Amino acid sequence: MTTYPPPQPDRSAQGRRSIIVAVALAVVALVAVLVVALWPDSGDSSGQPGAAAPPNANADRSGIIANPDAPGDHLLAIYQDYQCPVCAYADQILGSVVAQAVATNQIRVEFRTLVFLDRVNAEGETYQSSTRAANAAACADAAGVFFAFDQYLMANQPEEGVGYTDQYLTETVPAAIGLSDGALADFQRCYAEQTYAGFVQGVAQAAYDAGFNSTPTYVLDGQTLNLSTAEALSQDIAAVLAGQDPPGAAAPTTTAPACVPSDPPGPAPEPRPSHASPDGRGIVANPDAPGDHVLAIYTDYQCPYCAQAEQLTGDVVAQAATDNKVRIELRTMTFLDSVNQADATAQSSTRAANAAACADDAGVFLAYFRYIMEHQPTEGVGYTDQYLTETVPAAIGLSGEALTTMQQCYSQRTYAAFVDYVDSLTTTYDCVTGTPTYLLDGQSVAWNDPTALQAALDAIG
């Protein structure tokens, strides 16, 4: 789902967040305009070739090899950020296949770590958590436990924004994976001295320079994979071992514009849907709710991961809309337009967003949204006008004059300017660059855990 400006030294972090996982892990990028200021300077942290590198760094210092004994004939490169929740979820789905590849040495597995989510921990003891974790992982490589360290972090990742403390990275994780005695002391010294700070910065820089700017991204023998299931990844690996192209290869992930926080360009254009939010940043699913608290849902109608979010937490959101304690706003992004560039489904994300805005006038916005998410076509297949103006309305019971009005609204693209305005604000003003993103009163909340989301909603009183 973006292009990330590369990290620049000696400045403060700015900027913000996806994939393709689940029964279709959807890469939707999390983006940042950021800087990696690497704590106290401790030697060469320039990211230049002269910087110290961990023992299993690859030849061009763009990553760490998890299984250095594997031949270099085939390579699975995994781009990740240690604070990226979708990376953790991808590892949950695909980790067993990756672990098998590491154990059998049939293909080389490299981890190439980005650090754009440093910006979610801008101060305090978890300052720049992505960089902290990447430095710890590099030191774990020197201790001979890189893959175990990596896997533990992904399996026990704190909630985004909570971050990693030095104690967690240098005591809790090592204890959990059995690192002790002299090896532990050497690891802790390496981390404290930031021995591989320059290397970590260089890895992130190399990823940006190569155009890999969304996480997680899995690249097998140079082919970016359209991730789905563990079985599919196994088939991809089997294919390259047999001398074939991986069946799961896909075009590079569609990405949203780089996030540079800025003021809104002006008021939302007219006309607006009946229940547009007062500031024109989205559409309110429950307009009778007071505006004291807002759950803002950033979504793209073609994003498979957003469909997964609806499957997991849609009932919680719908109940919150009914209860009216919290205003539910849908803020729709359209960056996945580029996967449908011609014919009857061109610009499918924008088509669907326009249809949903027209459905709002008919009083069925939330029902329309939920139906699309529950019956989303495979990414790249897209939506036709007929599907959006006949199939979906019929499924949710829209008929008669209300249906005619909705169809006319859609055909005339009545809210085209509004849809474009909402999309532009998500990246330039809200600095949200990945879907799904759920913000409750401006704070990130779980979209994939109904219990956690309900608890967050209950906590506001």
Image (spheres, grey):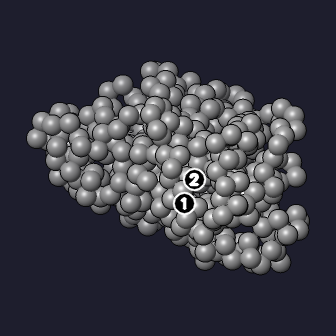
**Residue drawn at (80%, 74%) of the image:** 324
Q: Amino acid at mark 2?
A: Thr
Q: Which residue was labeled with disc 1? A: 392
Q: Secondary structure at mark 2?
A: helix
Give the x, y percent position of residue 450.
59, 74
Left or right of residue 9: residue 252: left
Q: Count the marks.
A: 2
Query: Quick check: marks 1 and 2 in contact, CB under 8 Å?
Result: yes
| Residue 171 shows in this picture | no
The quadrant the C terminus occupies is bottom right
Q: Amino acid at mark 1?
A: Val
Give the x, y percent position of residue 65.
32, 40
Q: Nearer the viewer, residue 323 or 77?
A: 323
Residue 460 location, quadrant:
bottom right
Q: CA distance from mark 1 to mark 2?
A: 7 Å
Q: Nearer the viewer, residue 204 or 356?
A: 356
**Residue drawn at (88%, 52%) of the image:** 278
Give the x, y percent position of residue 198.
52, 30
Which residue occupies the extreme top position in the image? 49
Which residue occupies the extreme left position in the image? 242
Residue 107 location, quadrant:
top left
**Residue drawn at (38%, 34%) of the image:** 251
Q: Nearer the viewer, residue 423 or 53?
A: 423
Q: Is residue 442 above or below residue 37?
A: below
Q: Which residue was labeled with disc 2? A: 389
Per the rendering, the mark at residue 68 is: none
| Residue 285 shows in this picture | yes
Q: Is residue 202 above or below residue 329?
A: above
Q: Secondary structure at mark 1?
A: helix
Give the x, y percent position of residue 103.
21, 54
Q: Is residue 281 above or below residue 457?
A: above
**Residue drawn at (58%, 38%) of the image:** 335
